[in-house]
């Protein structure tokens, strides 16, 4: 067999793909042998969704370096556009193709929203940008809750008031019913599809990071003025990262919509709490570290479920673990202490580190 | 006539937002961090009053005092345990996530102690409603107390920051920590004091909020917290007069939007106004525009 020579990044990316593949194989084996509880089985698709959301947000937060608190809004847009399409085309198309088109539509609509929101938002900086993305996320959720769309022989009818003011014909059908959302979305999502979509998003993001465009994006993160003075088009690259991140969140939303029979925009699933939760995955996994995002998304989603035996105390423990992990990972004193321990017991490691510094 | 009553309600809600936003903006100005747990300190304050007044049957004034003391201690403890170790962390996001963790922690502790059921909060205000214009215009006692409390707090805080030594120290620390330390200012003490004042304000805001909207759950504080955050940004985060203006404007916009446009869309309107303001003035109404240097 020919020996492959890989660069360090290629090796790193390969490890990331490999981890996802191994996880898939292990889960499939557990499923086949019946070692997985129905509770865990129900958690598989949400896990895929969270992983996709985490890696896509990491593109905005870690690679572009802008704090976004409205990621759930893009997921919401993707979910509703995808579910709307599936509902309209139910029966008119073969299932597989319909789902594929729904995914593409979700990605496209969320991506377009990313560009539309990104143009004004990305002019702001730091915490101002964070609050405006949060505001956009809440507005999207709010608008979806008062949106009514129906279909009859004359075509589509829109309303922002209620389903009666749609004035539908006799065979008319309300598709998006305001706060009740979309009901009866076909159940197309599955674990295999989810893993395939994770692979696809990973492929897009990892290749973007290691491309000329990705380096341009990271140069904006590291020093905007220096990047601008070397001729990098700041707006273009910022929008590129932001809209790709939004599009992947949109795909995750489509997957979410096709995993549930009823899709409603609640504060729980598309509100700022969700955006914050995704941000927690990203920061805990390591800002800018895609593999870390995957791992922390999986662990933090499983943790409350694994602690289910402790019933009421599980979210309390989750919160304490979160605070403790942040303090341990980020506090300068803890880092100093960790370095000391490393030096004491793994002197080789510290030696290598010193060499790197030199 | 109904417009005036909506306007007064708006100012009343706005005063609550302004009091919370003052805490937010002071903490931001001095520690440069978004304290996501601030909203939950409001909730803790409300539960403290609820326990004293409704469960133990003691006088409301004692309840308010206890709430203020509890929240002040809580705020300082949170700062000491969760935020101080991360003050010099490599990424500002670290302390943000810790704040989210603290927020989850407070919510879940409250959930364990008080349960998820909505508690009906007995108003601490005993003033009878004011009738104007032959009873066409009714202003509730809560509204009057809230507006007066808001005005008093704003005046006191402005005087404190501008006239007292501790207030001047706060301004100095928020300007430049290193230089302040060289001038002999106790930076850690000043930051702790800021958290204490912010949390005490949150307790008062919690009491006022729950007197006007008497339902209390462990998640009561979250949305007002976010709204106050919006108000602080709206007025220019880090600026004390900005937080007052932002808070009151936000309250008025929310109530008028609810009354005249759509009750479901009120939040969306508030956020839309915020976006428009920030696009025109990227650092808020009274925010300072800091020039970036190479």
Image (cartoon, rainbow, N blue to C red):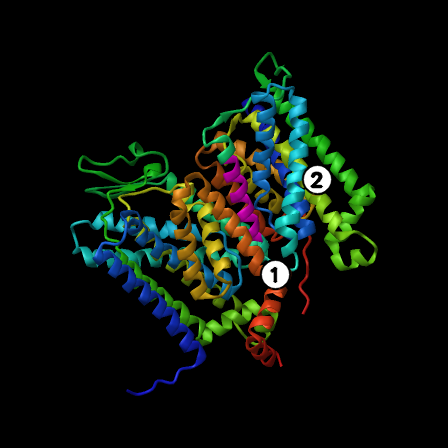
Q: Mark 2 and mark 1 in contact (Cβ < 8 Å)?
A: no
- Residue A145 picture location, percent across and down: 38, 40
Residue located beneath label 1 in the image? A334
> Which residue shows up at 79% across the image and 38% down it?
B159
> Which residue shows up at 54% across the image and 23% down it?
B2
Residue B106 highlighted magenta (yes or no): yes
Quick check: do tags 1 and 2 share a chain? no
Q: Magenta residues? A: B96-111
Image check: A240 left or right of B144? left
Image check: B206 left or right of A242? right
Closer to the camera: disc 1 or disc 2? 1
Residue located beneath label 2 in the image? B197
Quadrant, the C terminus of chain B? bottom right
Find the residue positioned furthest to the top: B134
Find the residue positioned furthest to the bottom: A2
Q: Chain of mark 2?
A: B
Give the main secondary structure, helix, strand or loop, of the magenta stretch: helix
Q: Nearer the viewer, residue A69 or B279?
A: A69
Residue A124 at least partly seen: no
**Which mark, residue A87?**
none
Q: Secondary structure at mark 2?
A: helix
Q: Nearer the viewer, residue B10 or A36?
A: A36
Q: How many C-alpha atoms fall within 10 Å of the one at disc 1: few (<14), some, or many (≥20)?
A: some
> Which residue shows up at 51% across the image and 58% down it?
A283
- Residue A75 picture location, percent across and down: 38, 52
Whether A294 is drawn above or below B165: the answer is below
- Residue A245 picture location, percent across and down: 42, 61
Q: Quadrant of residue B210?
A: top right
Whether A135 is drawn above or below A293: the answer is above
């Amino acid at each position: 067999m020919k020996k492959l020579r890989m660069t360090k990044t290629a090796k790193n990316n390969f490890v990331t793909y490999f981890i996802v593949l191994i996880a898939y194989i292990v889960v499939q084996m557990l499923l086949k042998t019946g070692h997985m509880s129905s509770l865990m089985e129900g958690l598989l698709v949400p896990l895929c969704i969270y992983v996709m959301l985490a890696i896509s947000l990491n593109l905005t937060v870690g690679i572009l370096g802008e704090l976004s608190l409205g990621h759930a809004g893009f997921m919401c847009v993707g979910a509703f556009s995808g579910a709307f399409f599936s509902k309209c085309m139910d029966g008119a198309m073969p299932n597989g193709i319909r789902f594929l088109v729904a995914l593409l539509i979700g990605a496209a609509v969320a991506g377009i929203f990313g560009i539309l929101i990104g143009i004004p938002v990305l002019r702001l900086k730091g915490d101002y940008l964070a609050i405006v993305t949060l505001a956009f996320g809440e507005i999207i959720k709010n608008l979806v809750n008062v949106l009514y769309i129906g279909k009859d022989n004359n075509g589509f009818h829109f309303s922002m008031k209620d389903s009666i003011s749609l004035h539908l014909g006799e065979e008319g059908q309300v598709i998006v019913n305001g706060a009740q959302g979309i009901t009866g979305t076909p159940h197309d999502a599955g674990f295999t599809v989810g893993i395939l979509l994770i692979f696809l998003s990973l492929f897009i993001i990892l290749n973007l990071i290691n491309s000329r465009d990705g380096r341009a994006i990271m140069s904006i993160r590291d020093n905007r003025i220096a990047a601008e003075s070397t001729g990098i088009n700041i707006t273009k690259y910022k929008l590129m990262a932001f809209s790709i991140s939004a599009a992947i969140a949109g795909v995750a939303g489509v997957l979410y919509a096709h995993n549930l029979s009823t899709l409603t925009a609640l504060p729980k699933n598309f509100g700022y709490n969700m955006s914050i939760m995704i941000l927690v995955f990203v920061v805990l996994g390591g800002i800018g570290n895609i593999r870390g995002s995957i791992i922390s998304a999986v662990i933090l989603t499983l943790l409350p479920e694994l602690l289910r035996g402790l019933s009421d105390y599980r979210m309390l423990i989750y919160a304490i673990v979160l605070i403790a992990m942040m303090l341990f990972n980020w506090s300068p004193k803890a880092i100093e202490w960790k370095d000391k321990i490393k030096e004491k017991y793994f002197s080789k490691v510290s030696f290598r580190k010193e060499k790197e510094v030199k | 006539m109904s417009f005036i009553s909506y306007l007064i309600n708006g100012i009343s809600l706005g005063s609550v937002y302004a009091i919370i936003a003052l805490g937010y903006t002071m903490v931001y100005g001095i520690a440069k961090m978004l304290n996501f747990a601030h909203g939950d300190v409001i909730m803790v304050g409300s539960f403290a009053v609820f326990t004293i007044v409704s469960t133990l049957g003691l006088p409301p004034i004692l309840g308010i005092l206890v709430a203020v003391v509890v929240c002040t201690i809580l705020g300082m403890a949170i700062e000491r345990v969760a935020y101080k170790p991360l003050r010099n962390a490599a990424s500002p996001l670290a302390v943000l996530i810790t704040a989210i963790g603290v927020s989850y922690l407070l919510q879940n502790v409250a959930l364990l102690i008080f349960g998820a059921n909505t508690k009906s909060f007995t108003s601490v205000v005993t003033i009878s409603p004011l009738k104007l214009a032959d009873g066409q215009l009714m202003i509730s006692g809560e509204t009057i107390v809230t507006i007066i409390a808001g005005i008093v707090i704003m005046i006191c805080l402005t005087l404190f920051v501008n006239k007292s030594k501790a207030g001047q120290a706060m301004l100095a620390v928020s300007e430049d920590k290193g230089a302040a330390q060289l001038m002999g200012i106790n930076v850690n003490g000043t930051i702790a004091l800021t958290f204490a004042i912010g949390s005490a304000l949150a307790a008062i805001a919690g009491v006022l909020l729950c007197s006007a909207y008497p339902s209390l759950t462990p998640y009561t504080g979250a949305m007002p917290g976010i709204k106050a955050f919006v108000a602080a940004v709206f007025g220019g985060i880090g600026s004390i007069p900005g937080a007052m203006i932002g808070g009151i404007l936000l309250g008025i916009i929310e109530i008028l939007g609810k009354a005249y446009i759509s009750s479901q869309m009120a939040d969306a309107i508030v956020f839309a106004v915020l976006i428009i303001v920030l696009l025109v003035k990227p650092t808020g109404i009274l925010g300072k525009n800091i020039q970036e240097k190479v």
